Image (cartoon, helix red, strand yellow):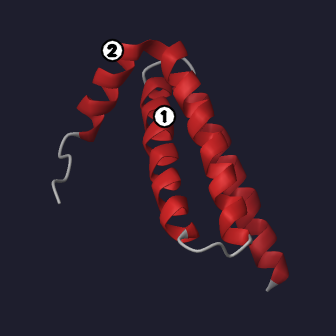
Amino acid sequence: MKIARDVPSIYAAAMRKWGKDGQLNVLQEECVELIVAISHVKRARPEAMKGFVEELADVNIMVGQFIQYLEGSRYGAEFWQVTHEKLDRLHERLARQE
């Protein structure tokens, strides 16, 4: 298996080539495909996990592109602030359930 060694450069090149709007379309499509794959897993369809892993990887790649895009914009700090707030809230919920 060939592993991409410079993921940030690949993300930046994709964003330059297809643009934010084009990549938003792809992100949206990949999220829909992941939702379908999740439904297949929940229904215990044969080979469902294979499709789920594929679609999860696609969404992960697209999300990675947009995280990197946001980090280079005025929204980068806000993204990380909101992310940390949500993680803190999750941690608190988990602690209350123990």
Q: Amino acid at mark 2?
A: Lys
Q: Position of residue 63 (x, y in %)?
A: 51, 39
Q: Residue at x 66, y 69 (%)?
A: 41
Would residue 6 be found to the left or right of residue 73 on screen?
left
Q: Could you say which is closer to the camera, residue 89 or residue 60?
A: 60
Q: Amino acid at mark 1?
A: Ile
**Where does label 2 land, which residue?**
17
- Label 1 Cα neighbours within 10 Å, binned few <14 / some 14-19 / many ≥20: some
* Helix, strand or loop for disc 1: helix
Q: Quadrant of residue 78?
A: top right
**Quarter of the figure that contains the N terminus:** bottom left
Q: Could you say which is closer to the camera, residue 5 or residue 47?
A: 47
Q: Position of residue 30 (x, y in %)?
A: 56, 39
| Earlier-in-chain disc, 1 versus 2 | 2
**Where does label 1 land, which residue?**
67
Q: Residue at x 48, y 47 (%)?
A: 60
Say above or below: 12 vs 17.
below
Say above or below: 18 vs 94.
above
